[in-house]
Amino acid sequence: MNNEVLDNEREQTGESKKIITRQNFLKVMGSMVVTGGVAGATIPFFSSKAKKEVPKKSIGSILPAGTIAKRVAADPTKIPAPIHRNHAISHDVTLEAKEVTARIESGVVFKYMTWNEQIPGPMIRVRQGDTVNLTLKNSTSRMHNIDMHAVYGTGGGNMATLVAPGEKSNMRFKAMYPGAFIYHCAVPNMDYHISSGMYGMILVEPPEGLPKVDHEFYVGQNEIYTVKEAGEGGLHDFDFKSMLAEDPTYVVLNGEKHALTPDVHGAMQVKTGETARIFFVNGGPNLTSSFHPIGNIFTKAWSAGAIINKPERFVQTMHVPPGSTGVFELDFPVPETVKLVDHSLTRVVRKGMLGEIAVKGKERVDIFNPNPSDKT
Ligand SMILES: [Cu+2]
Protein backbone atom coordinates (compact mmCIF):
# COMPACT_ATOMS: atom_id res chain seq x y z
CA MET A 1 0.00 0.00 0.00
CA ASN A 2 1.58 3.30 -0.98
CA ASN A 3 1.49 6.57 0.93
CA GLU A 4 -1.18 8.10 -1.23
CA VAL A 5 -3.51 5.29 -0.35
CA LEU A 6 -2.58 5.55 3.32
CA ASP A 7 -3.20 9.27 3.32
CA ASN A 8 -6.53 8.73 1.74
CA GLU A 9 -7.46 6.06 4.24
CA ARG A 10 -6.47 8.22 7.18
CA GLU A 11 -8.87 10.82 5.88
CA GLN A 12 -11.57 8.20 5.41
CA THR A 13 -11.16 6.69 8.87
CA GLY A 14 -11.94 9.81 10.80
CA GLU A 15 -8.74 11.83 10.99
CA SER A 16 -10.91 14.63 9.66
CA LYS A 17 -12.73 14.54 12.99
CA LYS A 18 -9.53 15.65 14.71
CA ILE A 19 -8.77 18.25 12.07
CA ILE A 20 -12.20 19.83 11.95
CA THR A 21 -13.36 20.26 15.52
CA ARG A 22 -16.22 22.64 16.12
CA GLN A 23 -13.72 25.23 17.37
CA ASN A 24 -11.56 24.86 14.32
CA PHE A 25 -14.60 25.13 12.14
CA LEU A 26 -15.53 28.46 13.71
CA LYS A 27 -12.03 29.77 13.06
CA VAL A 28 -12.12 28.64 9.47
CA MET A 29 -15.51 30.13 8.83
CA GLY A 30 -14.25 33.35 10.44
CA SER A 31 -11.20 33.47 8.21
CA MET A 32 -13.42 33.01 5.18
CA VAL A 33 -15.27 36.17 6.09
CA VAL A 34 -12.04 38.08 6.64
CA THR A 35 -10.56 36.93 3.35
CA GLY A 36 -13.72 37.86 1.55
CA GLY A 37 -15.46 34.60 0.84
CA VAL A 38 -14.74 31.01 0.02
CA ALA A 39 -12.37 31.50 -2.86
CA GLY A 40 -10.26 28.68 -1.49
CA ALA A 41 -6.73 29.48 -2.54
CA THR A 42 -6.29 32.18 0.12
CA ILE A 43 -7.42 29.89 2.93
CA PRO A 44 -4.56 27.69 4.13
CA PHE A 45 -6.88 25.18 5.76
CA PHE A 46 -8.89 24.91 2.61
CA SER A 47 -5.96 24.15 0.34
CA SER A 48 -4.13 21.78 2.70
CA LYS A 49 -7.36 19.91 3.31
CA ALA A 50 -7.90 19.78 -0.40
CA LYS A 51 -4.57 18.03 -0.87
CA LYS A 52 -5.47 15.45 1.75
CA GLU A 53 -8.78 14.64 0.16
CA VAL A 54 -7.52 14.01 -3.35
CA PRO A 55 -5.63 10.82 -3.98
CA LYS A 56 -3.55 11.22 -7.13
CA LYS A 57 -4.35 7.74 -8.32
CA SER A 58 -7.54 5.85 -8.14
CA ILE A 59 -7.38 2.87 -5.79
CA GLY A 60 -9.38 0.84 -8.24
CA SER A 61 -9.33 2.48 -11.61
CA ILE A 62 -11.04 -0.46 -13.24
CA LEU A 63 -14.36 -1.72 -11.94
CA PRO A 64 -14.34 -5.30 -10.73
CA ALA A 65 -16.26 -7.56 -13.10
CA GLY A 66 -19.91 -7.84 -12.20
CA THR A 67 -19.98 -4.62 -10.16
CA ILE A 68 -23.53 -3.42 -9.88
CA ALA A 69 -23.49 0.23 -8.95
CA LYS A 70 -26.31 1.63 -6.86
CA ARG A 71 -28.86 4.13 -8.06
CA VAL A 72 -28.30 7.53 -6.53
CA ALA A 73 -30.79 9.57 -8.60
CA ALA A 74 -33.81 10.64 -6.55
CA ASP A 75 -37.18 9.49 -7.88
CA PRO A 76 -38.65 12.84 -8.98
CA THR A 77 -42.17 11.74 -7.99
CA LYS A 78 -41.30 10.68 -4.43
CA ILE A 79 -42.04 13.92 -2.63
CA PRO A 80 -44.40 14.91 0.19
CA ALA A 81 -47.99 15.67 -0.85
CA PRO A 82 -49.33 19.23 -1.15
CA ILE A 83 -50.46 20.72 2.16
CA HIS A 84 -54.15 21.28 2.89
CA ARG A 85 -54.07 22.54 6.45
CA ASN A 86 -54.98 25.83 8.14
CA HIS A 87 -52.89 25.51 11.28
CA ALA A 88 -49.21 25.14 12.18
CA ILE A 89 -47.65 21.83 13.19
CA SER A 90 -44.20 20.49 14.10
CA HIS A 91 -42.18 18.19 11.86
CA ASP A 92 -39.44 15.79 12.90
CA VAL A 93 -37.05 15.52 9.94
CA THR A 94 -33.95 13.35 9.90
CA LEU A 95 -31.33 13.61 7.19
CA GLU A 96 -28.61 10.99 7.16
CA ALA A 97 -25.21 11.72 5.62
CA LYS A 98 -24.18 8.63 3.67
CA GLU A 99 -21.44 7.93 1.17
CA VAL A 100 -22.47 5.84 -1.80
CA THR A 101 -20.41 4.46 -4.65
CA ALA A 102 -22.83 4.73 -7.52
CA ARG A 103 -22.97 5.13 -11.26
CA ILE A 104 -22.62 8.44 -13.07
CA GLU A 105 -23.25 6.61 -16.31
CA SER A 106 -22.83 3.08 -17.60
CA GLY A 107 -19.39 1.79 -16.60
CA VAL A 108 -18.50 4.92 -14.63
CA VAL A 109 -18.79 5.15 -10.86
CA PHE A 110 -18.11 7.88 -8.32
CA LYS A 111 -18.01 8.13 -4.55
CA TYR A 112 -21.01 10.32 -3.88
CA MET A 113 -21.76 12.06 -0.60
CA THR A 114 -25.51 12.20 -0.11
CA TRP A 115 -28.37 12.93 2.19
CA ASN A 116 -30.31 9.66 2.52
CA GLU A 117 -28.53 8.07 -0.46
CA GLN A 118 -30.30 10.21 -3.02
CA ILE A 119 -29.54 13.27 -5.16
CA PRO A 120 -31.00 15.74 -4.63
CA GLY A 121 -31.58 15.00 -0.92
CA PRO A 122 -35.13 14.44 0.31
CA MET A 123 -37.56 17.28 -0.39
CA ILE A 124 -38.86 18.69 2.88
CA ARG A 125 -42.33 20.24 2.68
CA VAL A 126 -43.84 22.43 5.38
CA ARG A 127 -46.33 25.29 5.76
CA GLN A 128 -45.30 28.81 6.68
CA GLY A 129 -45.43 28.99 10.49
CA ASP A 130 -44.63 25.30 10.99
CA THR A 131 -41.75 24.26 13.25
CA VAL A 132 -39.07 21.85 12.07
CA ASN A 133 -36.99 19.68 14.40
CA LEU A 134 -34.11 18.77 12.13
CA THR A 135 -31.77 15.95 13.08
CA LEU A 136 -28.62 15.18 11.14
CA LYS A 137 -27.21 11.70 11.46
CA ASN A 138 -23.69 11.18 10.19
CA SER A 139 -22.95 7.71 8.84
CA THR A 140 -19.75 8.78 7.06
CA SER A 141 -16.13 9.36 8.06
CA ARG A 142 -16.22 13.13 7.46
CA MET A 143 -17.83 16.12 9.17
CA HIS A 144 -21.06 17.47 7.67
CA ASN A 145 -23.71 20.07 8.44
CA ILE A 146 -26.62 21.93 6.85
CA ASP A 147 -27.11 25.50 5.74
CA MET A 148 -30.83 25.77 5.10
CA HIS A 149 -31.94 28.90 3.27
CA ALA A 150 -35.39 28.74 4.91
CA VAL A 151 -33.84 29.50 8.30
CA TYR A 152 -33.40 32.80 10.15
CA GLY A 153 -30.26 32.02 12.19
CA THR A 154 -26.48 31.88 12.05
CA GLY A 155 -25.29 30.19 8.88
CA GLY A 156 -28.75 28.82 8.20
CA GLY A 157 -28.00 26.38 11.00
CA ASN A 158 -24.51 25.35 9.90
CA MET A 159 -22.99 25.58 13.38
CA ALA A 160 -25.96 24.07 15.17
CA THR A 161 -26.03 21.08 12.85
CA LEU A 162 -22.30 20.39 12.55
CA VAL A 163 -22.00 16.66 13.10
CA ALA A 164 -18.97 14.42 13.54
CA PRO A 165 -18.72 10.91 12.08
CA GLY A 166 -21.02 8.48 13.86
CA GLU A 167 -22.85 11.23 15.74
CA LYS A 168 -26.11 13.17 15.58
CA SER A 169 -26.87 16.89 15.71
CA ASN A 170 -30.09 18.79 16.00
CA MET A 171 -31.68 22.20 15.45
CA ARG A 172 -35.21 23.54 15.66
CA PHE A 173 -36.49 26.40 13.52
CA LYS A 174 -39.74 28.04 12.54
CA ALA A 175 -40.43 28.39 8.82
CA MET A 176 -41.07 32.14 8.86
CA TYR A 177 -41.31 32.92 5.15
CA PRO A 178 -42.65 31.06 2.11
CA GLY A 179 -40.70 29.81 -0.88
CA ALA A 180 -38.66 26.95 -2.28
CA PHE A 181 -35.17 26.96 -0.77
CA ILE A 182 -31.99 25.00 -1.14
CA TYR A 183 -30.33 23.24 1.76
CA HIS A 184 -26.73 22.16 1.43
CA CYS A 185 -23.72 20.94 3.35
CA ALA A 186 -21.60 23.91 4.47
CA VAL A 187 -18.38 22.54 5.97
CA PRO A 188 -15.14 24.24 4.81
CA ASN A 189 -14.93 21.89 1.81
CA MET A 190 -18.56 22.65 1.00
CA ASP A 191 -17.95 22.91 -2.74
CA TYR A 192 -16.55 19.36 -2.75
CA HIS A 193 -19.42 18.07 -0.62
CA ILE A 194 -22.17 19.79 -2.63
CA SER A 195 -20.64 18.70 -5.91
CA SER A 196 -20.62 15.16 -4.54
CA GLY A 197 -24.37 15.38 -3.89
CA MET A 198 -25.05 17.07 -0.55
CA TYR A 199 -27.91 19.40 -1.41
CA GLY A 200 -31.69 19.36 -1.53
CA MET A 201 -34.82 21.51 -1.22
CA ILE A 202 -37.16 22.64 1.52
CA LEU A 203 -40.50 23.96 0.28
CA VAL A 204 -42.33 26.32 2.62
CA GLU A 205 -45.87 26.63 1.31
CA PRO A 206 -47.73 29.89 1.91
CA PRO A 207 -50.73 29.55 4.26
CA GLU A 208 -53.14 29.34 1.31
CA GLY A 209 -51.15 26.53 -0.33
CA LEU A 210 -50.20 26.18 -3.99
CA PRO A 211 -52.49 26.01 -7.04
CA LYS A 212 -53.63 22.51 -7.96
CA VAL A 213 -51.68 20.68 -10.65
CA ASP A 214 -51.87 17.09 -11.90
CA HIS A 215 -48.22 16.21 -11.26
CA GLU A 216 -45.31 17.47 -9.21
CA PHE A 217 -41.69 16.60 -10.01
CA TYR A 218 -38.56 17.30 -7.99
CA VAL A 219 -35.20 17.57 -9.74
CA GLY A 220 -31.76 19.01 -9.01
CA GLN A 221 -28.73 20.01 -11.06
CA ASN A 222 -25.11 19.83 -9.98
CA GLU A 223 -21.62 19.55 -11.41
CA ILE A 224 -19.27 16.62 -10.85
CA TYR A 225 -15.52 17.21 -11.09
CA THR A 226 -13.41 14.10 -11.70
CA VAL A 227 -9.84 13.21 -12.65
CA LYS A 228 -10.96 11.41 -15.82
CA GLU A 229 -12.73 12.36 -19.02
CA ALA A 230 -16.51 12.01 -19.26
CA GLY A 231 -17.29 8.47 -20.35
CA GLU A 232 -13.92 7.00 -19.40
CA GLY A 233 -14.67 3.73 -17.64
CA GLY A 234 -14.05 2.85 -14.00
CA LEU A 235 -14.00 4.71 -10.72
CA HIS A 236 -13.72 8.48 -11.10
CA ASP A 237 -11.96 10.17 -8.20
CA PHE A 238 -12.88 13.72 -7.29
CA ASP A 239 -10.69 16.44 -8.85
CA PHE A 240 -10.07 19.72 -7.01
CA LYS A 241 -8.08 21.11 -9.93
CA SER A 242 -10.99 21.09 -12.37
CA MET A 243 -13.28 22.38 -9.62
CA LEU A 244 -10.98 25.36 -9.10
CA ALA A 245 -11.22 25.99 -12.84
CA GLU A 246 -15.01 25.49 -12.61
CA ASP A 247 -14.65 23.06 -15.52
CA PRO A 248 -16.74 20.02 -14.57
CA THR A 249 -16.48 16.57 -16.10
CA TYR A 250 -20.22 16.08 -15.76
CA VAL A 251 -23.22 18.33 -15.26
CA VAL A 252 -26.16 16.20 -14.23
CA LEU A 253 -29.83 16.17 -13.31
CA ASN A 254 -30.47 14.09 -10.16
CA GLY A 255 -26.85 13.09 -9.86
CA GLU A 256 -26.40 10.84 -12.90
CA LYS A 257 -25.99 11.34 -16.62
CA HIS A 258 -29.43 11.07 -18.27
CA ALA A 259 -30.88 9.58 -15.05
CA LEU A 260 -34.47 10.57 -15.83
CA THR A 261 -34.67 9.19 -19.36
CA PRO A 262 -35.90 5.84 -20.76
CA ASP A 263 -32.26 4.74 -21.19
CA VAL A 264 -31.57 4.86 -17.46
CA HIS A 265 -34.26 5.03 -14.74
CA GLY A 266 -37.17 6.17 -16.92
CA ALA A 267 -38.72 9.48 -17.94
CA MET A 268 -41.28 11.37 -15.90
CA GLN A 269 -44.78 10.48 -17.17
CA VAL A 270 -47.78 12.70 -17.92
CA LYS A 271 -50.83 12.64 -20.22
CA THR A 272 -51.94 15.26 -22.70
CA GLY A 273 -54.23 17.84 -21.11
CA GLU A 274 -52.54 17.51 -17.72
CA THR A 275 -50.39 20.05 -15.90
CA ALA A 276 -47.17 19.62 -13.95
CA ARG A 277 -45.11 21.62 -11.52
CA ILE A 278 -41.35 21.20 -11.44
CA PHE A 279 -39.41 21.97 -8.28
CA PHE A 280 -35.87 22.61 -9.50
CA VAL A 281 -32.86 23.13 -7.24
CA ASN A 282 -29.39 24.05 -8.46
CA GLY A 283 -26.75 22.75 -6.05
CA GLY A 284 -23.98 23.96 -8.33
CA PRO A 285 -21.57 24.45 -6.64
CA ASN A 286 -20.47 26.89 -9.36
CA LEU A 287 -22.53 27.01 -12.55
CA THR A 288 -25.74 28.91 -13.21
CA SER A 289 -28.30 26.80 -15.01
CA SER A 290 -30.21 28.11 -18.01
CA PHE A 291 -33.08 25.73 -17.41
CA HIS A 292 -35.27 25.08 -20.44
CA PRO A 293 -37.97 22.56 -21.48
CA ILE A 294 -37.27 21.63 -25.13
CA GLY A 295 -40.56 21.41 -27.06
CA ASN A 296 -42.52 23.21 -24.38
CA ILE A 297 -42.64 26.41 -22.31
CA PHE A 298 -42.91 27.32 -18.65
CA THR A 299 -46.50 28.63 -18.56
CA LYS A 300 -45.70 29.98 -15.09
CA ALA A 301 -42.23 30.47 -13.66
CA TRP A 302 -41.32 31.57 -10.17
CA SER A 303 -37.75 32.81 -10.24
CA ALA A 304 -35.61 31.90 -7.22
CA GLY A 305 -38.48 29.78 -5.91
CA ALA A 306 -40.22 32.95 -4.64
CA ILE A 307 -43.65 31.37 -4.88
CA ILE A 308 -45.78 34.17 -3.48
CA ASN A 309 -44.60 36.52 -6.23
CA LYS A 310 -46.62 36.89 -9.40
CA PRO A 311 -45.16 34.29 -11.77
CA GLU A 312 -43.57 35.17 -15.07
CA ARG A 313 -45.64 33.78 -17.95
CA PHE A 314 -44.60 31.70 -20.97
CA VAL A 315 -40.90 31.76 -20.26
CA GLN A 316 -38.55 29.69 -22.39
CA THR A 317 -35.36 29.63 -20.31
CA MET A 318 -34.91 30.51 -16.66
CA HIS A 319 -31.67 31.29 -14.94
CA VAL A 320 -31.24 29.39 -11.70
CA PRO A 321 -27.96 30.25 -10.00
CA PRO A 322 -26.20 27.83 -7.69
CA GLY A 323 -27.70 28.06 -4.23
CA SER A 324 -31.15 28.78 -5.56
CA THR A 325 -34.27 27.14 -6.95
CA GLY A 326 -37.00 27.64 -9.51
CA VAL A 327 -40.63 26.56 -9.54
CA PHE A 328 -42.13 25.99 -12.96
CA GLU A 329 -45.51 24.94 -14.32
CA LEU A 330 -46.10 23.37 -17.71
CA ASP A 331 -49.09 22.43 -19.88
CA PHE A 332 -48.95 19.42 -22.19
CA PRO A 333 -51.37 19.92 -25.08
CA VAL A 334 -49.69 17.44 -27.45
CA PRO A 335 -47.96 14.06 -27.11
CA GLU A 336 -44.20 14.52 -27.16
CA THR A 337 -41.01 14.06 -25.22
CA VAL A 338 -40.12 17.22 -23.32
CA LYS A 339 -36.40 17.41 -22.70
CA LEU A 340 -35.34 19.29 -19.59
CA VAL A 341 -31.92 20.82 -20.18
CA ASP A 342 -29.48 23.50 -19.16
CA HIS A 343 -29.39 25.58 -22.35
CA SER A 344 -25.64 25.97 -21.96
CA LEU A 345 -25.77 23.09 -24.38
CA THR A 346 -22.27 21.67 -24.10
CA ARG A 347 -23.42 20.55 -20.68
CA VAL A 348 -26.19 18.61 -22.40
CA VAL A 349 -24.33 17.22 -25.40
CA ARG A 350 -21.08 16.31 -23.65
CA LYS A 351 -21.67 16.37 -19.90
CA GLY A 352 -24.98 14.61 -19.29
CA MET A 353 -27.45 17.35 -18.25
CA LEU A 354 -30.74 15.98 -19.55
CA GLY A 355 -34.03 14.69 -18.16
CA GLU A 356 -37.25 13.83 -19.98
CA ILE A 357 -40.99 14.11 -19.52
CA ALA A 358 -42.89 11.62 -21.69
CA VAL A 359 -46.27 13.03 -22.70
CA LYS A 360 -48.72 10.36 -23.87
CA GLY A 361 -52.06 11.04 -25.52
CA LYS A 362 -53.92 11.74 -28.72
CA GLU A 363 -52.25 13.72 -31.48
CA ARG A 364 -53.51 17.28 -31.91
CA VAL A 365 -52.60 18.06 -35.52
CA ASP A 366 -54.34 21.42 -35.20
CA ILE A 367 -51.60 22.37 -32.72
CA PHE A 368 -48.65 20.41 -34.06
CA ASN A 369 -48.58 18.47 -37.31
CA PRO A 370 -45.22 16.89 -38.10
CA ASN A 371 -46.48 15.73 -41.55
CA PRO A 372 -48.78 18.45 -42.89
CA SER A 373 -48.83 16.95 -46.40
CA ASP A 374 -50.52 13.78 -45.06
CA LYS A 375 -54.23 13.70 -45.81
CA THR A 376 -54.96 11.80 -42.60
CU1 LIG B 1 -20.85 17.43 3.93
Image: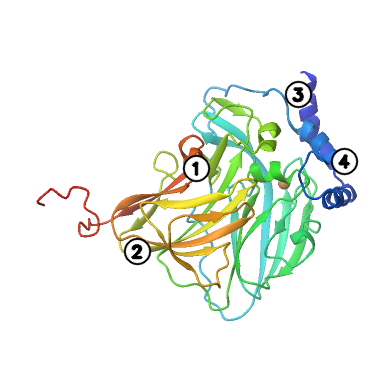
At 68% from the left and 51% from the top, the residue drawn is 96
List the residue tagged with mark 3: 5
Q: Where residue 354 sits in the image (x, y, percent)?
A: 46, 44
Give the mark, 3 or 2, whose residue is nearer the N terminus.
3
Mark sitting on residue 353: 1
List the residue tagged with mark 4: 18
Q: Is residue 284 left or right of residue 146?
A: left
At 70% from the left and 44% from the top, the residue drawn is 191
Vertical placement of 180 versus 371: above or below? below
Q: Which amino acid does the dot numbered 4 rest on?
A: Lys
Give the mark, 1 or 3, whose residue is nearer the N terminus.
3
Distance between mark 4 and mark 2 Cα atoms: 54 Å
List the residue tagged with mark 2: 274
Secondary-structure class at tag 3: helix
Hey, which quadrant is residue 1 in on the image? top right
Frontmost of labels 4 and 2 is 2
Q: Which amino acid does the dot numbered 1 rest on?
A: Met
Give the mark, 4 or 1, whose residue is nearer the N terminus.
4
Secondary-structure class at tag 2: loop
Q: Where residue 204 sits in the image (x, y, percent)?
A: 60, 68
Give the mark, 4 or 3, whose residue is nearer the N terminus.
3
